[in-house]
Amino acid sequence: MKNASKQRAILHMGAKTGKKSVSYIIDSAFLRSPKPYIVQSLLAVAAAAVILTFLRVITHTAIIAALGSSTFIVFALPNTHNAQPRCLIGGHIIGLVSGLIAYLAFSAGLSRLLPNHTELILAIGAAFSIGLAIFLMTITDTEHPPAAGTALGIIIQSWSYQTIIFILAYAVSLALVKWLLKDYLKNLA
């Protein structure tokens, strides 16, 4: 494995100068055909802008980061398992459930019993939410890595029922946009 990556690095080096070529830094597929990269990135901007504007919720930063990662997967890797609606929507549902379970058990539960240790309890609860999300996503075949961020966001920041509705609406809207653009999207990596 090490030899193969070393050989790839050597292939990208200039023959006499030893300097790295542009294709070492920029994907050679982009250099051959930049249009899909540009178009799909612009489509991601448009889709996210429309969905975020329509839903009018941008204050929950951890959740927005997770949903931004989902947008990346849908537009950069649309034909992967993680970008399929089952994983996109199901993963975020599991992230929500995992975050809520961790919140109820740790933030709302243990932190009241042990008020002098709330920071430690929050850290353990946050870690638990991620582990639970991983476990549930893998056993239900709904693996969507950004959804672990959803679980984390639910426990580390205050949440409301509007937050839950926003996450579900964003995931469903993103799946719908992906379906509408399925003939135009291709894996960029």
Image (cartoon, helix red, strand yellow):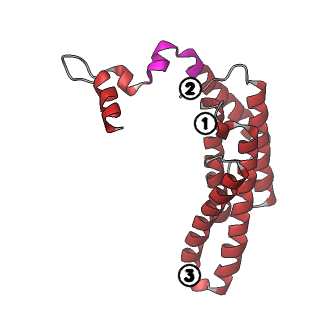
Q: For residue 70, what is the image quadrant?
A: top right
Residue 177 seen from this side: yes
Q: Could you say where residue 152 lies in the image, as x and y percent from the top left?
A: 62, 59
Helix, strand or loop: magenta stretch: helix
User: Which quadrant: the N terminus?
Assistant: top left
Span shown in magenta: 27-37
Query: Between tags 3 and 2, which lies in front?
Result: 2
Residue at disc 1, secondary structure: helix
Picture residue at 48% right of the left edge, 13% below the top: 32
Q: Amino acid at mark 2?
A: Leu
- Image vertical order of residue 116 relative to residue 174, above or below: below
**Which residue in the rendered view is the most extreme toward the left?**
16
> In the displayed structure, does residue 73 sit left or right of residue 25?
right
| Inter-mark Cα distance, 1 to 2 | 11 Å
For disc 1, the marked residue is 72
Q: Amino acid at mark 3?
A: His
Q: Could you say where residue 76 lies in the image, as x and y percent from the top left?
A: 59, 30
1 or 2: tag closer to the N-terminus: 1
Picture residue at 66% right of the left edge, 38% below the top: 81
- Image vertical order of residue 181 relative to residue 88, above or below: above
Residue 188: mark in rendering = 2
- Image vertical order of residue 165 relative to residue 37, above or below: below
Few, some or many C-alpha atoms within 10 Å of disc 1 (few <14, some 14-19, many ≥20)? some
3 or 2: tag closer to the N-terminus: 3
Q: For residue 101, what is the image quadrant?
A: bottom right
| Inter-mark Cα distance, 1 to 3 | 37 Å
Residue 117: mark in rendering = 3
Query: Between tags 1 and 2, which lies in front?
Result: 2
1 or 3: tag closer to the N-terminus: 1
| Inter-mark Cα distance, 3 to 2 | 46 Å
